[in-house]
Image: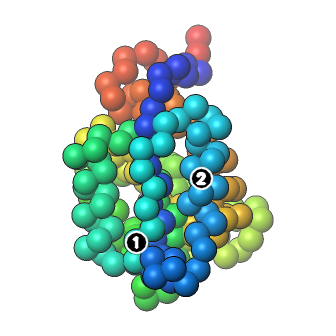
């Protein structure tokens, strides 16, 4: 497979009412930042905001449209609780969904826990940005990003108009 050697930027957005009020330490966001930096991605932003549809939409639009962040990861708000609105907010923002990313993460997670079927996270493209919803727990966020990491550079390369073929000859 063709893998781009370009350097890509990223931001991690943690959705947590308690985290945004300082009542709970965010452990998944910093882990994702550490993992992506280790892979050579350049961190542009990290934030913890409440599980509020309007705030999520506004932040995702700002990070994609104004800041031009290549890869935007959200963590939290993907379950079935009434406050879990991340997939709906992300759906409003993305222009094209990439169902295979969410399917791959759920498939891998189902090998570990039946609760994976409750994850409603999505992935998609806005402009030149790739947005991926990850679960909020540190363990699940790590396991899910590990599933998609091998495809991220190529995805970003293609989203930005790269013309090389996807498969190796």
The image position of residue 156, as x and y in percent, is: 43, 33
In contact (CB < 8 Å): disc 1 and disc 2: no
Q: Residues within 10 Å of mark 2 (few under 14, many from 20)?
A: many
Q: Residue at x 31, y 51 (%)?
A: 63
The image position of residue 12, as x and y in percent, is: 47, 55
Quadrant of residue 119 within the rendered picture: bottom right
Q: Earlier in the sequence, mark 1 or mark 2?
A: 2
Quadrant containing the C terminus in the rendered view:
top right
Classify mark 1: helix, strand or loop. strand
Residue 32's mark?
Answer: 2
User: Does 42 appear above or below 94?
Assistant: above
Residue lying farthest to the top in this orientation: 169
Classify mark 2: helix, strand or loop. helix
Q: Residue at x 45, y 56 (%)?
A: 46
Specify whether 79 is left or right of 64.
right
Task: Check disc 1 and report the residue beneath it.
Answer: 49
């Amino acid at each position: 497979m063709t893998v781009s050697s370009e350097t890509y930027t990223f931001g991690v957005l943690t959705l947590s009412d308690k985290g945004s009020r300082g009542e709970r330490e965010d452990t998944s966001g910093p882990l994702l930042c550490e993992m992506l930096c280790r892979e050579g991605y350049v961190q542009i932003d990290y934030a913890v905001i409440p599980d509020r549809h309007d705030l999520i939409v506004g932040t995702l639009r700002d990070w994609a449209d104004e800041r031009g962040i290549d890869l935007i990861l959200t963590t939290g708000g993907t379950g079935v609780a009434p406050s879990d609105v991340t997939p709906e907010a992300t759906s409003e923002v993305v222009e094209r969904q990439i169902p295979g990313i969410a399917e791959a993460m759920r498939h891998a997670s189902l090998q570990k826990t039946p609760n994976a079927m409750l994850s409603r996270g999505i992935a998609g493209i806005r402009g030149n940005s790739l947005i991926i919803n990850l679960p909020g727990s540190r363990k699940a966020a790590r396991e899910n990003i590990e599933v998609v990491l091998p495809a991220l550079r190529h995805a970003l390369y293609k989203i930005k108009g790269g013309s090389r073929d996807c498969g190796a000859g």
